[in-house]
Amino acid sequence: MKKLSKRERYFVLFCIICVSIFLCYKFVYLSLVQSYRYNQIGIDTLETKYRSHRAVAAQDSSIQKSLTSIRNELRKAESRFFPSGKESVIAARIQQDIEQICMKNGIKVQRSRVLKFEKIGSYKKISIQVIFQGSITAFNHIVFALKNHRKYFFIPEVEIRVTNTRNPTTIRTTMTVSGIMKT
C-alpha cells in the first residue's frame, strides 16, 4: 500500500470535512428550518381559521363541526407550549431542559444566554443560544431529543464548526433553541 503524501492527506481530510458539513446541513439543518417554518405557518393558519369559522358558525351547523375540529387541533398544539407567565422563568426552564438533554448525551453546555423575546400573534417566542462541544452523533441525539420533547422546541439557527481539522471527530456547535409561550 502506497504511503499518502502530506498533500494527499490534507485533500482526504478536506473531503471528509466537506462531506460531514454537507450531510449536517442537508439532513439536520434543512429539516429543522423546514419543520420550524411549517409549524409557524400551521399555528398562524389554525388561529386564523378558528377566528373566521367562529364568525360564520352562527349561520351554519356544519361549520360548527369544522370549528370544533380546528379548536381541538389548536388545543393539541398549544398543549406543548409553555403556559403564560414571566418570560424569565420560562427561559430558565428552557435552559434547564436543554442542559438536561445535553447531559443525557454526555455533553456539557459551555455557555448559554437568553435572546430577545419575540411576539408571534397571541404567543411569545423565547429563544436561548447554547454553545457546546461534542461528537456529531451526540449532536444528532440532542436535536432528536429537542424535536421529540414534551414541550415544543424548534431550532431556528445552528452553526457547526470542526474543532480540529486533522481529527474531525469533535464539533463546536452554537445553536439557538426556541420555545413558544402563551400570552
Image: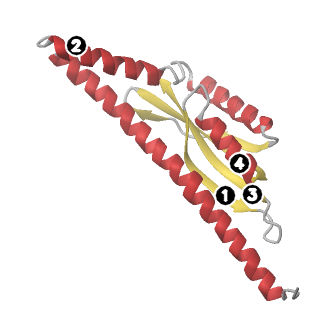
Q: Earlier in the sequence, mark 4 or mark 1?
A: 4
Q: Which mark is residue 139?
A: 4
From this view, report whether residue 174 is shown above or below residue 87: below
Q: Which mark is residue 171?
A: 3
| Location of residue 50 in the rendering, given as x and y in whole percent from the top left corner | 28, 22
Which residue is disc 1 drawn over?
Answer: 160
Confirm whether residue 147 shows in the render.
Answer: yes
Which residue is disc 2 drawn over?
Answer: 64
The residue nearer to you, when weighing 13 against 165, is 13
Q: Nearer the viewer, mark 2 or mark 3?
A: 2
From this view, report whether residue 161 is shown above or below residue 117: below
Task: Report crowding for label 3: few under 14, some 14 to 19, many 20 or more residues within 10 A (C-alpha).
Answer: some
| Location of residue 175 in the rendering, given as x and y in whole percent from the top left corner | 63, 48
Element at label 3: strand
Where does the N terminus fall, quadrant-wise?
bottom right
> In the visual, does 147 lie left or right of 3?
left
The residue nearer to you, when weighing 21 against 131, is 21
Q: Check contact, mark 3 vs mark 4: CB within 8 A.
A: yes
